[in-house]
Image (cartoon, rainbow, N blue to C red):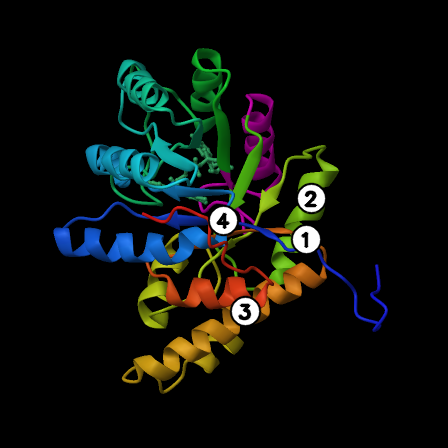
Amino acid sequence: PPTPDGHRAFKTPDISFEFFPPKTEEMERSLWETIKRLAPLSPNFVSVTYGAGGSTRERTHSTIARILAETDLLPAAHLTCVGAARGEIDEIVGRYHEVGVRHIVALRGDPPGGIGTPYSTHPDGYRSSAELVAGIKRQHGDVEVSVSAYPEKHPESPDFDADIDFLKAKVDAGATRAITQVFFDNDIYFRYLDRVRARGIDIPIVPGIMPMHNFKQARNFVTRAGTSVPDWLAEKFEGLDDDPETRKLVAATVAAGQVQKLAKNGVDTFHFYTMNRADLVFAISHLLGIRPNGAQKAA
Ligand code: FAD
């Protein structure tokens, strides 16, 4: 509703942050600096990714365990089922449940050869992300399950209908939130949302936002995952390859513009791909009206 000064009042959005498990002690220190800075923004949850094919299984677990032990944050553990037997997956989920984790981001995962190479399931494995969701819910009804969504469709999907059928199967299996692959053109998200709602899917489809600290690197990475990078965006970073300071300001401006436009159009939940860095995400959250809560235990 409009406020007395004529501006529309928006609810302060809900946010969540995604981290990846650190490889070295130096990276671990830097992640914890980031967590310390971002924790007071009171995110709904923070998630920790799972390396391709389970390569970070132990590191994902220990990062999640440390978040549980040292902060008041609610952690969500990413888990992929590619290349693993059901028994292994069930054991991982059981371990998470035992230490108190009540949120899993359930994914199929990339084929071992990378996106675009043929996918085959483990002979005793969950055959799809929907089966994984059902498996988790069957064993632990109290675990919240989030899944992925692809506003530009997954590169393996023949068309949008097939892609959205997959999302529907995941929702029918018990998923209650979808987090999108990164996108840069908000119209793509809104068109996707229309299609998803028309298919009768009513769970939150939370936009995944990635501030581009390093445009060139990020472009290569997201393009492989099926995200298009519009020319207008590439132009904003032109000539800045050797100028990280300006690149950072531009990246913050671009991502802040994107979330503010989404918020104006009614989006009230955002998931940030932090790349384990706090500065841009903190600034963008600030522009969304989010302020630190001094009482939040940071670390
Ligand atoms: P699904 O939702 O299972 O499938 C995506 C689409 O691919 C479907 O809609 C369907 O159309 C098509 N498809 C899938 N399987 C088949 C099939 N057998 N035949 C035909 N079409 C098929 N990867 C990691 O390794 N670790 C992570 O922590 C991680 N986190 C992620 C978090 C988010 C929010 C997102 C969006 C992605 C993440 N990924 C992660 C990447 C993900 O694992 C890959 O995109 C993978 O290729 C698909 O897994 P999924 O569960 O997203 O796919």
Q: Amino acid at mark 4?
A: Ser
Q: Tell me, yes or no, whether the highlighted magenta stretch contains residue 162.
A: yes
Mark nearer the viewer, 1 or 4: 4
Mark nearer the viewer, 4 or 2: 4
Q: Secondary structure at mark 4?
A: loop
Nearer-N-terminus badge (4/3): 4
Instruction: Say if residue 230 shows up in the picture.
Output: no
Residues at circles 1 and 2 in contact by the CB criterion of under 8 Å: yes
Q: Which residue is mark 4?
A: 42
| Closer to the camera in the image, 226 or 52 | 52
Single out the residue that lies furthest toward the front: 295
**Magenta residue span:** 148-174
Work out whether 124 lies above or below 45: above
Q: Secondary structure at mark 1?
A: helix
Q: Which residue is mark 1?
A: 191
Q: Percent x, y for residue 260?
A: 62, 66
How far is the residue under mark 1 from the one under mark 3?
Answer: 21 Å
Residues at circles 4 and 2 in contact by the CB criterion of under 8 Å: no
Mark identifier at residue 195: 2
Q: Percent x, y for residue 283?
A: 47, 68
Residues at circles 1 and 4 in contact by the CB criterion of under 8 Å: no
Q: Residues within 10 Å of mark 3 (few under 14, many from 20)?
A: many
How far is the residue under mark 1 from the one under mark 2?
Answer: 6 Å
How far is the residue under mark 4 from the one under mark 2?
Answer: 32 Å
